[in-house]
Image (cartoon, rainbow, N blue to C red):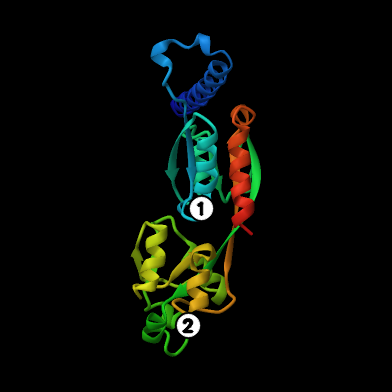
Amino acid sequence: MQGLGLGLYIASQIAQVHHMEQVRILEHDLLEQLPSLSAASDANEKVILRIAANADSLGTWFLDGISDFTKSTNYLVHLSVDDEDYTAEWLQQGKVVAAVSSSEKPIPGCRRFPLGSLRYHATCSPEFSDRFFHHGVTPKTLAVAPCLTFNQKDRLQSEWVEYVFQKKINLPAHWLPSTQSFVDASLMSMGWGMNPALLVDEHLSEGRLIELVPGKTLTVPLYWHISRLAADRISELTRFVSDAASQKLR
C-alpha cells in the first residue's frame, strides 16, 4: 500500500506540473488579447516553455526551428539535453511540455508528429585508419581502436558494430559529451565515432574523414511529442520545428 500511495503522490505531482505549464500558457494568451488585465509589474513577465531534445538534433537542425519560434513570439525557451532514447521520459515525468525523441510509441496525454530521420556515418580520419585499421575494419581491430562515446547512454557505436558484424564487441571508448567535439575529435584522430551526416558530409567529400565501412550508415527516426493540452495554444512551435526538420532531415 505504501508503494501504491507513493505512486499516486508522484502521479499527482506530475499532473500539477503539467497543469501549471498549461495555466502559464493560457495566461500568456489571455494577456496578449486583453493587455489591460496585466498589471504594470507584470508587463515584462515572460512565459517559459521547457523542451527536451537530443544533442545531435540541437547541433544540426533543431535550433533553426526554435530560433524562428522565439523571434515570432514572446515565450522564453529552456532546453534540456538528453539522449534521444530518453527525452520522452522528460515529457512523461512532467519536466517539459514538448520533446524531440526517437520513441515512436505515443505518450499518454500528448500528440506525436514524425519529423524524419537523422543519418549517421561511422567515421574516422585517414591517419586514424592507417594506425588502427591498416589490415581492415574487423571485430578484432575494433576491439583495440578507441571509439568516441557521448555518455553512458550513447549506444550508437555499439549498434553500428552489431548492425555491420552481427555481434557485440567490447569497445574501448573516449567519453566526449559534445556533438561538435565529436566531429573535431574525429578530425584530430582521437577516435572513430558515429557522426551526423549533416555535419560530416563535406569532410567526407574532401577526404578529411573516411567511412569505416563505406555505405554502412545508421538512421535514427525522430518524433516531436507535445502535451495535448498545450499543442493548440503553441501550435506555432510545432510548425517551426516541423519546418526545420523538413529542410534538414531525411
* Residue marked by disc 1: 57
Q: Residue at x 54, y 77 (%)?
A: 165
Q: Quadrant of residue 234?
A: top right
Is 173 in front, or is 65?
A: 65
At 52% across and 26% down in the image, what residue appears? 18
Dot 1 crowding, Cα within 10 Å, few <14, some 14–19, many 20+: many
Task: Tell me: 101 left or right of 148.
Answer: right
Residue 172 horizontal/vertical position (percent): 36, 71
In this figure, what is the number of numbered marks? 2
Work out whether 183 lies above or below 42. below
* Foreground tag (1 vs 2): 1
Q: What percent of the width, then of the height, locates residue 124? A: 43, 75
Helix, strand or loop at mark 2? loop
Q: Amino acid at mark 1?
A: Ser
**Residue that carries the numbered disc 2 in the rendered image:** 137
Of the 4 image quadrants, the one containing the C terminus is bottom right
Q: Is residue 109 visible?
A: no
Cα–Cα gap, marks 1 and 2: 28 Å
| Residue contact between numbered discs 1 and 2, judged by CB atoms under 8 Å | no
Q: Is residue 102 visible?
A: yes
Residue extending furthest toward the bottom: 135
Q: What's the residue at 46%, 27% (across, down)?
A: 10
Crowd around label 2: few <14 · some 14–19 · many ≥20 (10 Å)? some
Q: Is residue 5 above or below residue 209?
A: above
Q: Which element type, helix, strand or loop, lies under badge 1? A: helix
Q: Between residues 42 and 128, which one lies in front from this camera angle?
A: 42
Check disc 2 and give the amino acid type: Val
Position of residue 120 relative to residue 113, above or below, is: below
Q: Residue sitting at 56 percent across and 13 percent down?
A: 34
Residue 111 lies in what quarter of the image?
A: top right
